[in-house]
Amino acid sequence: MNMDIIFHATGGNPEAWLNSLQQAMPGANIRVWQEGDTAPADYALVWKPPAAMLRGRTDLKAIFNLGAGVDAILQLGDALPAGVPVIRIDDAGMGVQMGEFVTHAVLRYFRRLDDYAMQNREQLWRCLAPYEKEDFSIGVLGLGVLGNRIIDALRPFGFPLHGWSRTQKDLPGVICHSGQEGLDHFLRASRVLVVILPLTAETEDILHHANLAKLPRGAYVINVARGAHLVDADLLALIRQGHIAGATLDVFREEPLAPAHPFWQEPRIRITPHISALTVRGESARQIATKIAALEDGQQVIGLVDQSRGY
C-alpha cells in the first residue's frame, strides 16, 4: 500500500499504534501529525484530533476515527474538510468487552452484591431477599452495534429485555421502543437502564430529572456511552431521595473525574475510568487496512458516519 497517512490520538500511545498500523499496512508511509504539518496525505487516522490537523485538508480521501464514539471529531464543525467521509471502526473487540462490563454491573445489582459489601463493612451476617427475575427488566438505550452486543450478552440470563432507538428496530426476544413516545414507555419499563447512545444534540442531557424520574422506584443506571448524556446533579438527587438505587458510571462530562466531584462521595455510585470497552489496536489496524484497500479499489465500506445525524 503506497500512500501517505497522518496519525493523531489524544491520550493514546503513538508508538504502539504505529507498530500495529505498519504491520497491517507495510507499504504505507504513516507519520504522527505535528503542529504545522501540511504535507500531503491520503488518509487521516484520528482520536480527538485538533482542528488544525484537518482544517483545509482537501487532499484526504477519508478520515478514520479510532474509537466507537464520533462526537469529538464532529464537534470540529467547519474544520472538517467538506466532502471527506468520516469512517468509524466497527466493534473491533469492543462489543465483547462492553457486554462483559454491563453484564457484571447488572448481575452485581441483581444479586445484591453491593448491599452485601456494605454489610461486610459493618460485620453483618444477614441474608437479603432476592429480586425476582421476571420483575427485573433491563432497558438498553441505544440499539447500534454495541447495544446489540450488550443485548446478546444479557440474553442467556433470562431477564426481560427492552430496547430504545431513534427509529423502530425489530430484535428477537426484545421489546423495542422508538421515538419520544416510545422513550417514555421504555423508561417506565426499565428496572435497569443501560445507556449506550451516540452523543448528539438530541441525546445530550437526555438523562435529566424528568426522564430519570420515569424509571421505576429502585431502578439502577449504567452509563457506558458519554458523560454528557447524564445531568449529574439530577442523578444524585434521585439517588439521595431513594428513587434510584444506585449507578455504575464509566463515563463523565470531564475526564478524569475531578477529586471534588460529589460522585466520589456517594457510596451507591460505582466509578470506573472509561474502561468498559478499550480499542483493540491490532484488530482496529487490520480493519482500517481492509477498509483502505477497499476504498482504493473503489468499493463501498461500512461504518460511514452520517454527519447530519451525528453517528
Image (spheres, helix red, strand yellow):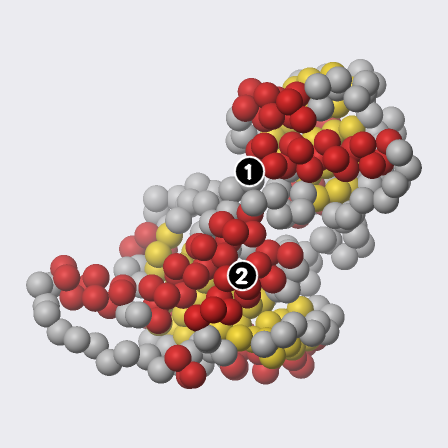
Q: Which mark is residue 177?
A: none
Q: Which residue is mark 1?
A: 280
The residue positioned farthest toward the right in the image shown? 298
In terms of image quadrants, where is residue 118? bottom left
Query: Please, is residue 156 above or below residue 289 in the view?
Result: below
Residue 113 point in image, percent of width and height? 27, 65
Q: Tell me the kind of residue under disc 2.
A: Ile
Q: Tell me the kind of residue under disc 1.
A: Val
Which residue is depicted at the point 68% across and 56% down? 200
Q: Camera-side residue: 261 or 104?
A: 104
In terms of image quadrants, where is residue 176? bottom right
Q: Is residue 87 left or right of residue 23?
A: right
Which residue is depicted at the point 45% across and 52% down? 250
Which residue is depicted at the point 10% across and 68% down? 124
Q: Which mark is residue 150?
A: 2
* Residue 94 seen by the camera: yes
Query: Please, is residue 275 above or below residue 163 in the view?
Result: above
Which residue is depicted at the point 70% across and 72% down? 169
* Residue 193 seen by the camera: no
* Helix, strand or loop status at disc 1: loop
